[in-house]
């Protein structure tokens, strides 16, 4: 992923970061990049004044993320955390914004994952979680280049964008008790926008 994120996927991360901020209206505070891999989206989010956590369950990805963050001179802005989205090692109510790109397809139990996401969001906190390439021009050029390089990639792309896959996500999201939900399904990709409501004590 690191090589792809630094070459063919490179232009998508600033676009996705900008889309996340514009769609949610959240531009500061604590941001978690869930399933951050080499931390390309976390790094793009530093364009805005967030304190950022890059969360991934893979020690190898996290090693690469730490190196990329150091090379970008951003060690003071991003903390890499090893942990599973189904059991996030962060306190409840910490996050103003949770972003995540391309990771949701790999989560094992979407019910657990979204209930953890709901737990760590602040009241009024929002998410921009899903997959995509940021806009139609990037999507079309990247999809055709990925298929040219590896024809089997198309199968994976079709599976990830299938109705069956989406039903897994929407089924889990529909069980959340404290979030309003909005979906985006357009040239930017497929994104789940949750907003945590205030909880009456
Ligand atoms: C396709 S990569 C995407 C990486 C990055 N978000 C990007 O767009 O460049 C998916 C990432 O999700 C991580 N991941 C998958 N399941 C996870 C889980 N249950 N908890 C935390 N991270 C997970 C993987 O380790 C991997 O780094």
Image (cartoon, rainbow, N blue to C red):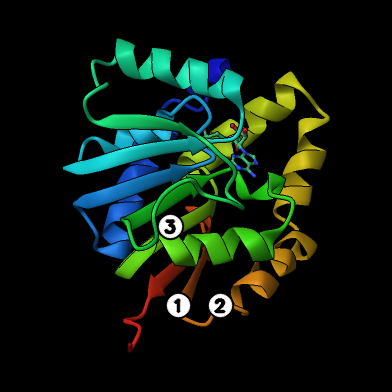
Task: Between residue 156 and residue 98, name the one nearer to us.
Answer: 98
User: Residue 72 placed where, x, y %?
Assistant: 28, 16
Secondary structure at badge 3 equals strand
Query: Seen from this angle, which residue lies furthest bottom?
Result: 200
| Mark 1: few/some/many CA within 10 Å (<14, 14-19, 20+) | many
137 left or right, relative to 31 = right
Q: Is residue 63 visible?
A: yes
Mark closer to the observer (3, 2): 2
Task: Between residue 37 and residue 167, name the one nearer to us.
Answer: 37
Q: Which of marks 3 and 2 is nearer the N terminus?
A: 3
The residue indicated by pointer 1 is 179
Q: Between marks 3 and 2, how big is the CA–CA gap?
A: 16 Å
Q: In which quarter of the image is the C terminus?
A: bottom left
Task: Between residue 139 and residue 97, name the one nearer to us.
Answer: 97
- Rendering quarter of residue 26: bottom left
Is the C-beta separation of discs 2 and 1 under 8 Å?
Answer: yes
User: Residue 144 placed where, x, y %?
Assistant: 65, 32
Q: Which of marks 3 and 1 is nearer the N terminus?
A: 3
On whether ligand 1 comes within 8 Å of the CB at mark 2, the answer is: no
Q: Residue at x 43, y 43 (%)?
A: 33
């Amino acid at each position: 992923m690191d090589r792809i994120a630094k070459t063919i996927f490179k232009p998508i991360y600033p676009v996705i970061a900008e889309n996340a901020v514009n769609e949610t209206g959240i531009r500061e505070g604590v941001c978690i990049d869930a399933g951050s891999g080499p931390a390309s989206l976390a790094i793009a989010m530093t364009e805005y004044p967030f304190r950022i956590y890059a969360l991934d369950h893979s020690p190898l990805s996290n090693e690469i993320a730490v190196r990329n963050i150091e090379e970008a001179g951003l060690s003071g802005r991003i903390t890499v955390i090893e942990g599973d989205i189904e059991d996030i090692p962060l306190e409840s109510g910490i996050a103003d914004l949770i972003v995540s790109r391309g990771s949701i397809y790999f989560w094992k139990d979407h019910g657990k994952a979204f209930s953890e996401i709901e737990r760590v969001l602040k009241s009024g906190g929002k998410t921009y979680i899903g997959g995509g390439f940021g806009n139609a021009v990037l999507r079309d050029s990247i999809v055709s280049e990925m298929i040219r390089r590896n024809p089997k990639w198309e199968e994976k792309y079709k599976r990830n964008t299938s109705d069956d896959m989406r039903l897994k996500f929407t089924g889990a999201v529909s069980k959340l008790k404290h979030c309003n939900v909005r979906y985006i399904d357009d040239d930017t990709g497929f994104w789940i926008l949750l907003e945590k409501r205030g909880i009456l004590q």
